[in-house]
Amino acid sequence: MMLFLSYLPLWLLAVLLWVLLRRRAYQVYPCFFSYAAFGVAASVARFVAHNHPHPYFATYWITEAVFCILGILSMHEVVRSSLGNLPRAWWAHSIFPMILIASVALSLARTHAVPPQVAGLRFWIITGEIAVRFVQVFIFAGLASLVPLIGLRWRQYPFGVAMGFGLYATVMLLTTSRFADLGAAFKFLWDVTNLGTYSVAVLIWIWFFWVPAKVADPESKTLGPVLG
């Protein structure tokens, strides 16, 4: 039973992937679709290797690195789609690079202040994960505060993608800081929080993509092509 619950995100990601295929999301959001498809493949690979420590170790960290890359690409996709109605604004093209630079700087500062208990490549993967979390929090907060300015509707897909990532990233940044303070005594609660929050994030994505997005202004380019 515990093994089933620990892989609950796998079943939810499989449902999400089916919904994305049904909506043909790969046509408009290929990076987020790739993230969901890779999430299913990575979860299956981890499940297969979970009884073999060395293969599982390699599988876990390789997939974590790929998750970082696809997470960044998905957030870039969200920003590009959300600001699609501002193609002539010079500053619109600099938003994502500035967020990325700020997030990397904050991640490096955080890992310098509280160094992860790992070294080598794993250190840089964790540093990259923290940077991705900051990017996700900043973009979700920015979209939520600038909805009236950019013409984004809360029930549209970019906002849903950002909400799922933003919720998960916020909770994980807070709990990871707590984990760093308390150490092994906090690990079980950290694992449960990670599992529960990510499952909620996937449920948010499923809910947003379950029905076609509504665009109030048919001339709006905020979403690009509307999924059917």
Image (cartoon, rainbow, N blue to C red):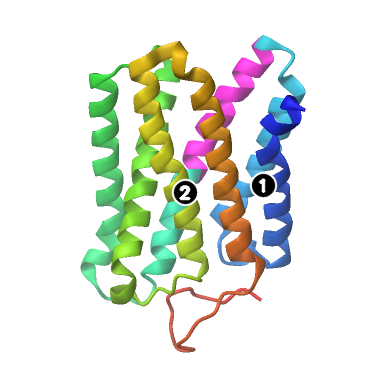
Which residue is labeled 1 in the image?
37
Helix, strand or loop at label 1? It is: helix
CA–CA distance between discs 2 and 1? 16 Å
Please state the extent of the stretch shown in magenta in the rendering.
Answer: 54-70
What's under tag 1, amino acid-wise?
Ala
What residue is shown at x 67% (from left), y 47% (from top)? 37
Q: Is residue 11 left or right of residue 145?
A: right
Name the spot of residue 139 as percent of width and height, x first: 35, 54
Name the one closer to the observer, 54 or 181.
181
The numbered disc on residue 165 is 2
Please tell me whether mark 2 or mark 1 is closer to you in this view: 2
Say whether residue 206 is left or right of residue 105.
right
Q: Label 2 is placed on what type of residue?
A: Phe
Would you say residue 60 sits in the magenta stretch?
Answer: yes
SS label for mark 2: helix
- Residue 128 at what x, y percent from top left? 39, 32
**Residue 118 can be seen in this image:** no
Q: Quadrant of residue 100?
A: top left
Rate crowding at label 1 as few (under 14), some (14 to 19) or many (20 or more) other CA atoms within 10 Å: some
Q: Residue at x 26, y 43 (%)?
A: 101
Residue 183 painted magenta: no
Is residue 225 in sight in this rendering?
Answer: yes
